[in-house]
Image: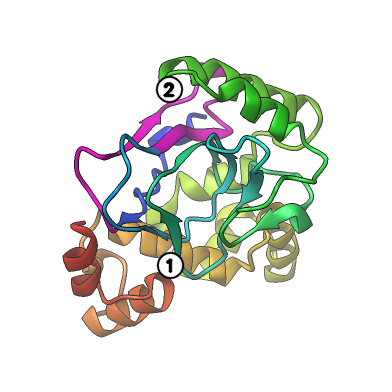
């Protein structure tokens, strides 16, 4: 089942837009389409006149991140239920892999939820991949990133996840934990254990994150009881009201 038809997280917020900052996404090769949402690159084309603030949004995805300005720096990154703003400075060059929710099966203690600025010391061959990426165009990076994903799959760090795939393909039918349990044919207790193990989320937190992500592409009344509930949920997850976020990040 191709998850790209089910769930497409929105691009995070950028404080600086224009010709000096470039963000690019590319879909994965067909053999990785059930595991990877996209390959991506974020870079400056010249030194910016001011520091760049990257407002990362919760999306239940895990990323492999490579700092190509210093290839020793890499990491496995993910947010939980709240957005965070990262100061990337005035010059930077990152590339990465965004996995679908539930596809990452590596040690969750290695996942970081803040700015990655230290050399990678984990067990994955991320710095080796990072060095291979340096100097490549983004179109040429994709083959190297795909090779890293295949390594992760071969060694048990990532795999297609039938349970989260079913959730992502039926988001419109899930309004509660009970809905999710019924969809999967699990008791509430079984659901709690299963979703926590597969995603690191409690079921109600996963629903909150996925619903806020949906709100960028749907009218809020399709997802929330009223505007007050929507504003509260959005601000709790994103850190701004919907109006403030649109004004600040042009979304």
163 relative to 51 in the view: left or right: right
Q: Is residue 216 above or below residue 23?
A: below
Question: To which quarter of the image does residue 215 belong?
Answer: bottom left
Q: Which mark is residue 175?
A: 1
Distance between mark 2 and mark 1 Cα atoms = 39 Å
Give the residue drawn at x 64%, y 41%: 103
Residue 24: in magenta span:
yes
Q: Residues within 10 Å of mark 2 (few under 14, many from 20)?
A: some
Nearer to us in this view, 14 or 206: 14
Q: Secondary structure at mark 2?
A: helix
x, y percent for residue 70: 59, 38
Query: From which residue to which does the magenta span run?
Result: 15-42
Q: Is residue 20 above or below residue 199?
A: above
Nearer to us in this view, 47 or 62: 47
Please give the residue where the numbered disc 2 appears in the rendered image.
138
Q: Are the residues at dot 2 and dot 1 in contact (C-beta closer than 8 Å)?
A: no
Q: Secondary structure at mark 1?
A: loop
x, y percent for residue 156: 80, 34
142 relative to 164 in the view: left or right: left
Residue 96: in magenta span:
no
Q: Residues within 10 Å of mark 1 (few under 14, many from 20)?
A: some
| Residue 29 shows in this picture | no
Give the residue drawn at x 31%, y 34%: 45
Nearer to us in this view, 40 or 101: 40
């Amino acid at each position: 089942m191709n998850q790209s038809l089910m769930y497409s997280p929105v691009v995070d917020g950028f404080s600086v837009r224009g010709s000096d900052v470039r963000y690019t996404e590319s879909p994965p090769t067909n053999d990785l389409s059930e595991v990877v949402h996209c390959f991506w690159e974020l870079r400056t084309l010249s030194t910016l006149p001011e520091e760049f603030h990257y407002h990362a949004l919760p999306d239940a995805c895990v990323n492999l991140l490579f700092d190509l300005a210093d290839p020793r720096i890499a990491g496995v990154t993910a947010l939980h239920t709240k957005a965070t703003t990262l100061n990337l400075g005035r010059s930077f060059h990152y590339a990465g892999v965004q996995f679908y929710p539930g596809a990452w099966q590596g040690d969750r203690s290695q996942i970081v939820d803040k700015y990655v600025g230290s050399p990678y010391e984990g067990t994955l061959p991320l710095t080796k991949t990072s060095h291979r990426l340096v100097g490549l165009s983004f179109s040429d990076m994709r083959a190297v990133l795909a090779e890293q994903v295949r390594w992760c799959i071969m060694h048990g760090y990532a795999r297609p996840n039938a349970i989260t795939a079913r959730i992502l393909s039926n988001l419109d039918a899930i309004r509660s934990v009970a809905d999710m349990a019924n969809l999967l044919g699990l008791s509430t207790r079984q659901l709690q254990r299963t979703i926590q193990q597969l995603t690191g989320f409690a079921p109600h937190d996963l629903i909150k994150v996925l619903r806020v992500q949906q709100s960028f592409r749907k009218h809020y009344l399709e997802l929330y009881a009223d505007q007050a509930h929507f504003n509260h949920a959005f601000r709790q997850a994103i850190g701004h009201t919907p109006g403030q976020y649109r004004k600040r990040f042009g979304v």
